[in-house]
Amino acid sequence: MPRSKLLWQLYPTYLLITLAAIISGGWYALNSVREFYMDQIATDLEAKANLSRDQIVPLLNRSEKLSNVCRRIATQASVRVTVVSFDGTVMCDSEKDPTRMDNHGNRPEIRRAFSGETGSSIRFSSTLREDLFYLGLPIYVGDQVRGVVRLSIPVTFIDRVLRKIQWQIVLGGVVVAILAALISLYISRRISRPIIEIRKGAERFAKGELTHQVPIPDSLEIGDLAQTLNQMAEQLYSTINTITTQRNEREAILSSMTEGVLAVDNEERIIGINKAASRLLEVDLERVSHRTLAEAVRLP
């Protein structure tokens, strides 16, 4: 299998984990912001609906004034206002003529408001030809629900605000991703750099530079490895010095002898010969090494 640098094995992993965390966190943040904003919209509409209801209740039986109040509330609150009677008939609407509007008794927010609770829904409005967020609040006359005041705003307005927030979150995520990529690269380099130094040190040891010391990093495991290599180099250097000293002593002894000394292995290959033996046998010291006796020595 093709090999790659440790840096390029670590860095993509860190980057992938970071990006996955940022994407999942961003997705969660976007959904949370949308839910929070929709809750805020619902709370705001409910507050406006409560204020509107207080103005609408005294005018339930006065359609002309009721229509004027609906339009005035809609203008002041920047919402669409609709008042629906207990049988689903539209009593007034700030956008359209109520006489031309369908019965609203089957609308989900209206049905929920008829049950005495606050109802809300998001759906397409056939009247305005766009998606709207609706919130219905029951109108009580005594202890009975006699109608519903409904406020609505276009979803496009909500989406426009949310889109702006989403872009801010996305931009923040991109900035964080860039910072995370740089930090991941720095961490990956910091992890791989000591290993590169150890490799370079091992190469110098292989070339015979046994006095070289590999830098010991802060990491415990890698630091132990570097220290072990340094100890190995020291022991190897000491062993080589000992062997060299013994060899020099042996050669000095053999060179000073007047007797000829010849050493061979089991296959009669020459593994050692002193000067006295080379003169006696008339052979060159360098040429006869590792050659057989029959090849090297021609004197019967």
Image: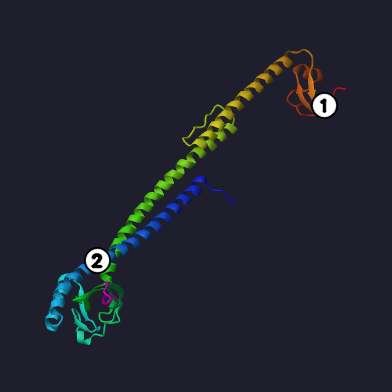
Residue type at mark 1 is: Leu
Q: Nearer the viewer, residue 20 or 267?
A: 20
- Total marks drawn? 2
Which quadrant of the structure image shows residue 127?
Answer: bottom left
Residue that mark 1 sits on: 293
Q: Is residue 47 above or below residue 245?
A: below
Residue type at mark 2 is: Thr
As drawn, is 154 to the left or to the right of 193?
Answer: left
Between marks 2 and 1, how big is the CA–CA gap?
108 Å
Chain-order first, disc 2 or disc 1 = 2
Location of the C terminus (image quadrant): top right
Q: Nearer the viewer, residue 125 or 208?
A: 125
The residue that appears at 49% across and 38% down in the rendered structure is 194
Mark 2 in CB contact with mark 1 (< 8 angstroms): no
Q: Residue 140 location, x and y as percent?
A: 20, 76
Which quadrant of the structure image shows residue 99?
Answer: bottom left
Q: Given the current orientation, which residue lies at the most extreme left position?
A: 65
Q: Can you tell which of label 2 and label 1 is closer to the viewer?
A: 2
As drawn, is 255 to the left or to the right of 92?
Answer: right
The boundaries of the magenta stretch are 112-118
Q: Residue 56 location, x and y as percent?
A: 15, 76
SS of the residue under disc 1: helix
As drawn, is 106 to the left or to the right of 2?
Answer: left
The residue that appears at 49% across and 32% down in the rendered structure is 216
Q: Is residue 285 above or below residue 57?
A: above
Residue that mark 2 sits on: 43
